[in-house]
Amino acid sequence: MIMRLFLPAVLIVSLAFLSGCDTTGTKRKPQKKSGGWHSPASSGDEPVSDYPPKQSSPSQDRPTDKPPQTTDIPPRQPEPPVKTGELPYAKQVAGKPGFVTSPFAPFAGYIDVRGFPPGTEVKDPYSGKTFLVP
């Protein structure tokens, strides 16, 4: 007797679950998983943040196309070009002709300047700055 009621009960329960499914053919937009960092430009949605709370003012009610500026890191400014007379000279390594130490990174290692005449501008491979060969 229980076996005769089991099959109709399973059919009724499965129909009840299937009736909750949307079969009208409308597809929902897949939801994005939150995880990792994504720039605001790559996603079409603006990030939602409750912290810090926004101050309401008439000038800030209009949306802007620019992303908000972070004040934690100041913008990096390029180094001014160094004049030829202001370049420092490298220091020769005692006992090793043709090798010098950089004035910008003296403990980084030796730099091979064999084949460069004295007074030539050479780029320091450790700091990326230019110095003169002694």
Image (cartoon, helix red, strand yellow):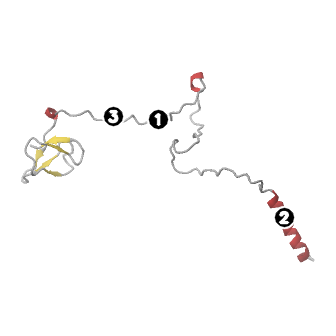
Marker disc for residue 23: none
Question: Where on the picture, by quarter, is residue 80?
Answer: top left
94 to 67, vertically: above or below: below
- Residue 116 position, x and y percent, is 10, 48
* Viewer-closest of 42 and 57: 42
Marker disc for residue 70: 1
User: What crowding class fits label 3: few (fewer than 14 Cα within 10 Å), some (14-19), or many (20 or more)?
Assistant: few
- Residue 49 position, x and y percent, is 58, 38
User: What crowding class fits label 1: few (fewer than 14 Cα within 10 Å), some (14-19), or many (20 or more)?
Assistant: few
Q: Which residue is mark 2?
A: 13
Question: Which comes before the other along the chain, label 1 or label 2?
Answer: 2
Q: Which residue is mark 3?
A: 77
User: The disc labelled 3 sits on which kind of residue?
Assistant: Gln
Observer-side mark, 1 or 3, equals 3
Q: Seen in the image, is 44 located left or right of residue 114?
A: right
CA–CA distance in space, label 1 to label 3: 16 Å
Q: Which residue is located at x 77 percent, y 53 percent?
A: 24
CA–CA distance in space, label 1 to label 2: 55 Å
User: The disc labelled 1 sits on which kind of residue?
Assistant: Thr
